[in-house]
Amino acid sequence: MEEPASLVRDPDFMKFWVGQSISVFGAQFSPLAIGFIAVKILDASDTQLGYLAFFNTIPFLTIGLLVGVWADRHRRRRIMLMADFGRAAVLFSIPFAAVFYALSMNLIYLVTLLAGILTVFFEIDYQSYVPSLVQKSQIVEANSKMETSRSTAQAVGPSAAGFVVNKFWAPLAILGDTIGYLASSFSLLLIRHPETVPEATVKRSTWHDIREGLGIVFGDKRLKAIAATTATSNLFSSAWGAILIKYMLDDLHMSIGEIGLAGGIGSLGGILGALTASRVMKGLGVGRTILLGISLSFVSVVLYFIPPQSVADANALYVPSPAFFLVTASTFVLSIGVLLYNIPQVSYRQALVPKEVQGRMNATMRTLVWGTLPIGSLLGGASGDLIGTQETIGLMAALGSLAFLWILFSPVRGVKEFPHG
């Protein structure tokens, strides 16, 4: 079989890649900044942090299927462009309010909800747009390049965000997201690759298209297993993730600079995962690589569950605390696992489903797998206040480690390579 041309020679993909690379770098700033604002400035409880994560993810559960139909009926690049402009404007309201008004948890909730709605539109259209921008034989290369950029951004971004929050001002760091989204918008404007809208889908009812998207996923044992695995993983990772920054700041006594640096260094594992995913798939096969990735993702989280008293006396200004090294190691392994899971499973889904229904398939998958995020966020927040932050992280990590069972007992485990044609 003839090898496809490298995407480096494709000017439209390169514009898209550069724009998204800048965007994902900027997107590393607001999670750390907003978390710091909530915990240290607004003194948020575990339950309030659960609400915050809930508002960020509830749009995927409530409007995801409708957005999928919308994505298949309209030009996806245009929707992504508008979503980027909208997210830039919404997030800018936080530093604006900090200067001219006042910050409050209600404002943070509102901004998070609006940004979450716009993210639904962008993310569903993004995954549906890539297969229309490149050839099917280039999908793995495209996803590997995009994930390499994402992992690089996750390696550099948190450290930069931690520096800005620590040395300057937390609301100022949110401008990193605003600049990133504007850069993404500009790159999308420059793309000249033609994008068509299938006429047949416009004549169908919305509910018909939603049912078709559900049928695509639930009618295929492979897609159903991937959805169940990711949904289970996301349910419990969102539970411990909602309260993790509070745990690191208050219980592990890490500074915001340490948290950013640990996240940055640890995320280098994602680069390793992105660069080696294709080779691992060739050696193990697609299905076993997916199984390896999801297994690594939660094995690593056990390192977060460490006694807070072991770091209580650490002087973070001069000597990194023991928690810093453990969190860095955990993030490194976690990042490898996430990439070894995401690249093959997303590429497999994109190669398995026709282009004209990519939006509905991706929307159904996103609704199922991200729909558990708001539930997990509320669960983690309530559990943190009920039994303790550290205990909640340990319990949710243990339950999440079982997500691999869906893949283990499904046809996905035996998949050797991507479908062609």
Image: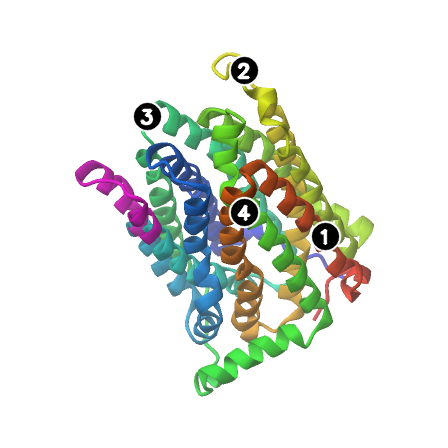
Q: Which amino acid does label 3 sit on?
A: Phe
Write down the region rendered in magenta: 90-110
Among the two numbered marks 1 and 3 on one chain, the one whose residue lies closer to the N terminus? 3
The quarter of the picture where the N terminus appears is bottom right
Q: Residue 313: which numbered mark, if any?
A: 2
Residue at image mark 1: 402
> In which quadrant will I find the C terminus?
bottom right
Q: Where is residue 416 in the image (x, y as percent from the top left)?
A: 80, 60
> Viewer-proximal residue, 405 or 78?
405
The disc placed on residue 168 is 3
Neighbour tally class for label 4: few under 14, some 14-19, many 20 plus, Cα within 10 Å? many
Give SS at disc 1.
Answer: helix
Is residue 205 left or right of 270 when viewed as pictured?
left
Give the foreground label among 3 and 4. 4
- Residue closest to the eye, 260 or 5: 260
Question: Which amino acid, mark 4?
Answer: Ser
Q: Distance between the residues labelled 1 and 3?
A: 42 Å
Q: Which quadrant of the view contains residue 163?
A: top left
